Image (tube, helix red, strand yellow):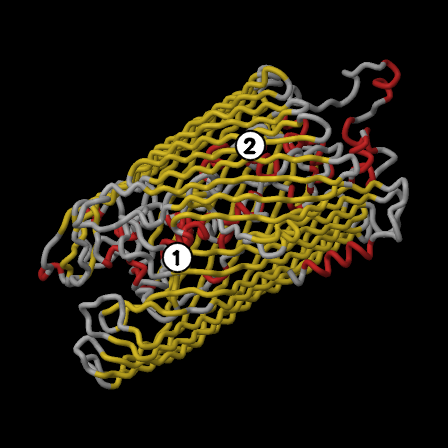
Amino acid sequence: MRFFVPGVLLAWLAFPAGAAEDDDLQGSVELGYRIVDVNGNEDKYREDVNLDDGALWLSGLDIDYRPADSRLFDSLVLEASDLGGEPHESARFRMSKAGRYDLSLRYRRTEYFHRDAGYFLRPEGDLHGWDTARDFVNLNLRIETTDWLTLRFGADNNERDGRSTTSRDIQRDVFVLDSPIDQKASSFWAAADFRWGWADITVEQRSTSWENRWLATTSGNSGTDPGEPSLLNDYRQLQTTDADAPVTLLSFRGSPWERFRFLVEYAHVDAELDYDTDADWDGIDFTGQDFQTTLTNKGRVQRTSDLWDVEAAIVLLPRIELTIDYARRSYEQDGSIDSVEVQNGGAEQGTYPVQGVVDNSLDLDTSGLTLNWQATRSLSLALGAGWQERTADFELSGPAVETMRTLYRAGIRWRPNRIWDFRLDLEQGDDDNPLTPISPTSEDRIRFRANVTPVSGLALSLNFLDRSLENDESTPLGLQTDDTPPAEEISLAKSDITSWGLVLTWSRKALDLTAGYNHADVGRNAHIVYVTGSTFVPAFDVFTTRDETAYVADTDVFHGAIAYRFSKGWSAGARAVVQENAGSFPVNTDVYGAWIRYLLKSGVFFRVNFDRYDYDEDNPFAGDPALPTPDVNDYDAQLLTFSAGYRF
Amino acid sequence: MLEFLRSAHWKADPEGSCEGCHGPGGDHAEEADPTRIGRFGPEIPAMVRSNACLECHGRDRAQSRFVSSDHALASVACDDCHDPHGSSREFLLRKPALELCYGCHPTVRAAFSLNERHPGSRGGVVCSDCHDPHRRSGRTVLGGFKQQVCLKCHTEYRGPWVFEHEAVAAEGCGSCHLPHGSVNRYLLTYPRVSDLCLQCHPEQPFFHDLTDVGGSRTTSFNDCTACHAMIHGSNNDALFLN
């Protein structure tokens, strides 16, 4: 918010003493008051909606000023919404003079709340909770100094604060810890764009840094397992991290001949993170003995990243263009750890040092070919193929893994006339050695869309999407140990999504209507053999259980909105979003809203909004005494908002 | 016309604005023939319409790779989203940003209608904050460092970590999360955390009791992140316990 105020002041100062008669000034301002009534789980309401009772100090502000004659600027825009205590605030200021400069400032604040009391698949609830907010500020300035040189400057600031809870396994029990959030990231950059005949060159230098002060505390905490005698009298852990990452970008692109253009880009990032952990805790251990523990850890992680992009495009025939591209993404990092945990007293008394360096690297080399053919005025075709060699070398996961991915794709669009428009896209991909058990060895995607626009303002669109990912020969990263069962027994992971829908839009002078329906079938499963009795030495494994992680979702979404202007003064509208989800986690949500507005000739307007949110989980085990999980998350909220504003 | 006189296109070049995009207009003016000048509209091939814009804007780094973008290959032209004659919206967009994207991507709209959806969708975040409409998508270029887009805002997960979660490093956040919307908490692909983790980590130590009770595993070991709380990466512990 504090960054928004200077923007408003700047906008105010930028105005001439008063807008002249020939100037173009448009905008609106709106304030209001809201009454909220929530029945049911208010925490879940805060998670999903989070709109409170009370005044809406600046629910909307919109100023668009274009003076007829000003040496300072020819466009000034100021937009803001939901400022003053709402969970999602945003504001944008932009001032520019064509051919001279462009200045923009953007602000956002997003609150996040999560407190999960539990549901039938997690009856014990979630030990982790958040009540935090993120503030984002972005500043950009572009100065066109000459025909051949443009300078750009910018800054980003991203802060997060608030409260949270986390959890930790200590002495065979799990403890919930308070953990205030204090994080900050910022970056500044300067860039120069040179234009030289047919060539363009960009040089950009960026300074990026981020820091995180992570604190976790508790006292007098007996843990979450009543069967364990473990107790924490006091726990305090402070971990600070500070990182810097200068980024250098060079871009060279151009079109030396009419039918040929190229691009070469290179970015280099040197990230360096220093961390420092200091913790101590004491209490009663799992055997009932007193203990005291201290942990110190200090280290550094250095990561060097190189990013290359090369692209060349040539027009083979007037309407056939071939693009050849190559991209390389690679990083290498060394992370050092120098940790020592000392426990005095208790069954696990001792000193536990960990020292060393962990080296990881990942290289991705991607090549591609794309052919774009505008066959006729109404028909276009696109064909593409891509190949990616990946080498992942994570020190703790065994030897490096090399894989080759391929992706072929084709697209066709046929627009025979202004009424009909058809599109079909197909993709087929393979991976000969997936990096994780859920990385696909094969993937298929088909999408079809048809639009019909019989008359201006009326459109009906149909869409169909089917995407299938499958892993049938997993040799996963992270499981390359002698104790791992044979790869083919680990998993057959599949993920299928089939979705189709219809959307109708109708826009006339006084009417705007949208109505849509979407159905999605989602199926995921992984056949696994998980070794619940694993001792990490197969011969001594206690027992093996065959199981399947299976997930099904069958979701229907209806959405609609209508707005109608009855007269110059009166207008009204309504909206609805209804979601019905069956499957592994049955849940239904209904959102309804209606509004009416009256606009006076003077530009003053009044508006009344009514909204209703209904959240309903459907616990298939409700009433089963062996699984006592009530539907604790359901809520029904009604919101009534009065607002008034002025449009000019 | 009034909007055009307010637009940056007019302000940047008031002398030759129309012909800059439509080409020479002498014959058109003399003969009053609408076919004797460069025209736009859905009946004109997208490649032709976009090339008129890219004459100038194609030299900007941001739009320099548009011709190989997914939009260009799907015959989406610049003027399908932008109104070169002027708009009160930023970047001369024809409609509010979300509405514009939803027009061709209804399945994404449906995902944002689910009970768990990316909270940014309610607060001034638009599709182009994560997706670059002027370049090829991450999927069709087989991904790069896939997590980079998410880390722009979720800076606490940037690391770099001494102990990386390989799935995140190699396959990106999307291997566990559905960023637009999901039925499940934390936008996860599975409602029960253990189902998600077991896909890659089937081997469990002897004290992990994952007994299935009535089709619903109920022990605390089904909530893997209760202990492995630093699941995105850690500087203290290879098992992400601390």
Q: Element at badge 1?
A: loop
Asked if one can make out residue A494 in the rendered structure from this viewpoint, the answer is no
Instruction: Kindly identify the amino acid type of the residue bearing the numbered disc 1.
Output: Arg
Q: Earlier in the sequence, mark 2 or mark 1?
A: 1
- Please give the label number shown on residue B18: none
Label 2, label 1: how far apart the Cα atoms are? 31 Å
Q: Quadrant of the C terminus of chain A?
A: top right
Nearest the viewer among A645 and A310 is: A645
* Residue A92 at x, y percent in the picture: 68, 51
Q: Element at badge 2?
A: strand
Left or right of B27 in this view: A211: left
Chain of the residue that carries numbered disc 1 in the rendered image: A
Nearest the viewer among B101 and A436 is: B101
Chain of the residue that carries numbered disc 2 in the rendered image: A
Disc 2 crowd, CA 10 A, few/some/many (<14, 14-19, 20+): some
Give the residue drawn at x 53%, y 45%.
B121
Tell me the residue that label 2 is attached to.
Answer: A574
Mark 2 against mark 1, which lies toward the viewer? 2
Give the residue drawn at x 32%, y 41%.
A441
Asked if one can make out residue A221 in the rendered structure from this viewpoint, the answer is yes
Disc 1 crowd, CA 10 A, few/some/many (<14, 14-19, 20+): some
* Residue A112 at x, y percent in the picture: 48, 56
Residue B221 lies, with reference to residue A342, above or below; the image says above
* Residue A343 at x, y percent in the picture: 27, 83
CB atoms at circles 2 and 1 under 8 Å apart? no
Q: Quadrant of the N terminus of chain A?
A: bottom right
Instruction: Kindly identify the amino acid type of the residue bearing the numbered disc 2.
Output: Ala
Nearest the viewer among A615 and A519 is: A615
Tell me the residue that label 1 is attached to.
Answer: A115
